[in-house]
Image (spheres, rainbow, N blue to C red):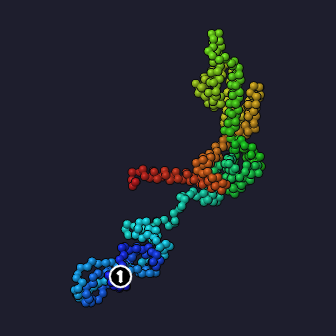
Amino acid sequence: MVQESMSPMSLRVSRGLKNCPRHASSGAVATRRRDRARAVAVAPAAMPWPAVTSTTLAMRGPIARSIWSLPSPVIAAPAVAVAFPVILLTLLCLTASTPAVSSSGRSDWSPKTACPTRLPVGTSGATTVSSSPMPPSRTGSRPPGKKSLAHVQAGYLSAALADFSGYLAFDEVYDGPFCVLSVVDNRRYNRLAFAVLDHDPTHDDIRVFLKEVRISLNVRELVVQGITTDGSSLYPKPLQEVWPSVPHQVCEFHVLKEITKAVLHALAKLRKHLTDEIPEQPRGRPSKQRQTQARVIARKQQRVSDLFTNRHLFVRHYLSGAQKELLQRLTRGLRQLRTLRAIMDEVYRLFDRRCKTQTALKKLAALRRRVRRFKKLGKSLDKLKSPNLEKALEFLDDKLLPSTSNAVERGNRRLRKAQGSIYSARTKSHLEQRLALDMEREQRAPRRKKTLETLHAGRSRADSLH
């Protein structure tokens, strides 16, 4: 508690309550929080009425004390002496102070204070704070790639192999300098494992990957019934070493793709041969003597153009009645073109599940002898001599063995889509985390779908509260 009286001449008037220090201050800054002020009455005494009465405000802080005096207007004659108690109002406020760095800071009452000392106060008088127990993230939400990778390496495989079908599909996909090896349950469409290499795979890399998969299956006493791969030359030799007695199926789609490409290439050669047989016309409008020849040349050129426009008819599996008539009209008088379509029909008949593998192999031998007679086709149909075509017929003896590797190709497509839309900085660890996260999300998808269906069914009932 402080009591001071000042004369009118020595009175210093403060225009406002200043909190931040000046050059002459004690180096302390007071906050806006103040305790309850207490008024103290001074004992009455007979004294002349002063010309000016001042009210003294005292504020105490941990470092220094500040005093402000406010002037009061004169309301009595100066020469009159009265016995009236003169009250000096002293306000004592205990405040917290913070050392100031600069002595020219703004007031704490200013909306643009240079030295804020506390959090803002809410509308109800309480301090507004964050309800989150953790500090806010500076970069936003991040996918839990590291946790997903640890889960895939620990307990993911047991859940994925809970309903193992016995059929596997292997494939590789390239991402810049990296190569991702994948294995999938070819009937359940469950991705089982992967390996990221920082170089092009070799037979040794494939052999190591296959042995790791075999160990994981042997621990759980699971047996492999069949394996499907694409037409890559990386797999036949390592598969024969790791699983010598398991049928190896080459993807039917990849084999048909190569044959289809060869047939279209042979068709392009025949179109070029037909174009070379068309005589050149002189420039300008044809004369009356050459009008008949010009019409014949125009029909031949239109025929070549129609062959290019409808080239898909030579490799399409199933043709409608109108498409068959159009194909007959386009190939009229051209035996080689009809032979190309007949070859594709024979290839499609090889993959008919109503026959066995031995029967299909006999048909394939007859087809190869037939193609050998067409010298004009040259090496365009050498794909029919590939050993992959024979391996692509393994599924005919096993009705459960898938003929394609679409299950593993689906995971590769998801990775290729992520390359352009999700991430751009590609490292080995980033690829592993991204693949693990995608596999974990895909594993949770059936359970999430079942939960949503249960919720929708519950909310749609008549007695539901929603």
Q: Is residue 291 above or below residue 114?
A: above
Pick the residue in front: 295 or 206. 295
- Determine the secondary structure under disc 1: loop
Residue at 42% x, 68% y: name it. 120
- Residue identifier under label 1: 10
- Residue 6 rendering spot, x and y as whole percentages: 34, 84
Pick the residue in front: 60 or 251. 60
- Residue 84 rendering spot, x and y as whole percentages: 24, 86
Q: Is residue 122 above or below residue 54?
A: above
Number of numbered discs overlaid on the protein picture: 1
Pick the residue in front: 133 or 396. 133
- Residue farthest toward the top in the current orientation of the protein: 289
Quadrant in which the C terminus is drawn: bottom left
Q: Is residue 111 above or below residue 166?
A: below
Quadrant in the picture for residue 316: top right
- Residue 34 rendering spot, x and y as whole percentages: 39, 76
Pick the residue in front: 252 or 80. 80
Query: Could you tell whether 25 is left or right of 436 in the image?
Result: left
Residue at 72% x, 51% y: name it. 199
Residue at 61% x, 51% y: name it. 424
- Residue 104 rendering spot, x and y as whole percentages: 46, 71
Quadrant in which the N terminus is drawn: bottom left
Residues packed near mark 1 inside 10 Å, few (<14), some (14 to 19) or many (20 plus): few
Query: Could you tell whether 426 is left or right of 449 in the image?
Result: right
Residue type at mark 1?
Ser
Residue at 74% x, 46% y: name it. 235
Q: Is residue 181 visible?
A: no
Q: Is residue 379 visible?
A: yes
